[in-house]
Image (spheres, rainbow, N blue to C red):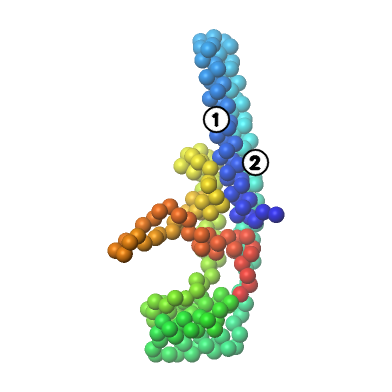
Amino acid sequence: MFTLTERFFIQIKSFIKATAEITNEYAAEMDRAKAFTGSDGGKQIERKAAEARDTALKKEREDTWKAVSGILSDMRANNVARKLALPTPEMYSLLNVLKMRTTLTADDLEQAAASLEGNAACLAALADIAKENKIHAKLPQPPLSTDAVTAFIDTLENSTRTMLNGGSYLANREPKSEADCLTRFGALPYKVEQLGGNGEYVNLGKTDDALIERYSAVVNGLEAVM
């Protein structure tokens, strides 16, 4: 059984492939009509080719939008259905102690993260403490907010509408993978990598698979209750 993100990828890829085939068939018919340029027969071939193309494209757009809109609706439902477990009394006490501390180090927060592992709400609170104290610690990523995931789904929807309305920059090639599709249609950032030791970071066109996994877990309804 396919996940929602897999189904989205399949629908997008299928639409781009189908429309390319329809366009190629139309071009072939127009080439055939050249042999009858100026004649009624040639004009009839051109007219029928245009009608067949327009009818086929209309059906592809309608079928794709129907399928994608259902997928996006299910993604939205999974996003709002998320639940985060409440912290245990020990976790709650640890966070309170950290908030009361007048001095904190990165090591303090990293040790606390180990004790709070598995509880997304606590890790999010720990990230807030680090930010408030301007401490750069190696902490687990806090959960994506409902608003952030909603914005991602909205972008998938808007991108799909743009493609179906003729946005060539999205329909000019089939996505290479599910990650490639979600990055392009969800407007997610590509992974930035450091080259050499000069501190220069560049975009080499590689998808940020860790970020994609976080979004996918939510919209697919697979994010663990933490």
Looking at the rendered structure, the number of numbered marks drawn on it comes to 2
How packed mark 1 is, by other alpha carbons closer than 10 Å (few <14, some 14-19, many 20 or more), is some
Q: Label 1: state its secondary structure.
A: helix
The answer to whether residue 69 is seen in the rendering is no
Q: Residue at x 39, y 55 (%)?
A: 203
Q: Earlier in the sequence, mark 1 or mark 2?
A: 1
**Which of the 4 quarters of the picture holds residue 134?**
bottom left
Looking at the rendering, which quadrant does residue 149 occupy? bottom right
* Mark drawn on residue 23: 1
Q: Residue furthest front?
A: 196
Q: Residues within 10 Å of mark 2 (few under 14, many from 20)?
A: few
Disc 2 residue type (three-letter): Asp
- Considering depth in this image, is 121 or 81 the residue closer to the camera? 121
Q: Is residue 81 above or below residue 126?
A: above
The residue type indicated by label 1 comes to: Thr
Measured in 3D between alpha carbons, the distance from the residue under mark 1 to the one under mark 2, in whole angstroms, is 17 Å
- Residue at left 70%, top 54%? 1
Residue drawn at 52 percent across, 77 percent down:
123
Q: Locate the C terminus by quadrant.
A: bottom right
Is label 1 or label 2 in front? 1
Check disc 2 and report the residue beneath it: 63
Q: Residue pushed farthest top? A: 39
Q: Residue at x 40, y 53 (%)?
A: 204
Residue 40: x percent and y percent? Answer: 57, 10
The percent position of residue 193, horizontal first and vertical second, equals: 39, 60
Compared with residue 72, is residue 218 higher up or lower down, i.e. above or below? below
Query: What's the mark number on residue 45?
Result: none
| Local secondary structure at mark 2 | helix
Return the x and y of residue 166 as percentages of the image width and height.
Answer: 51, 38
Q: Is residue 89 above or below residue 55?
A: below
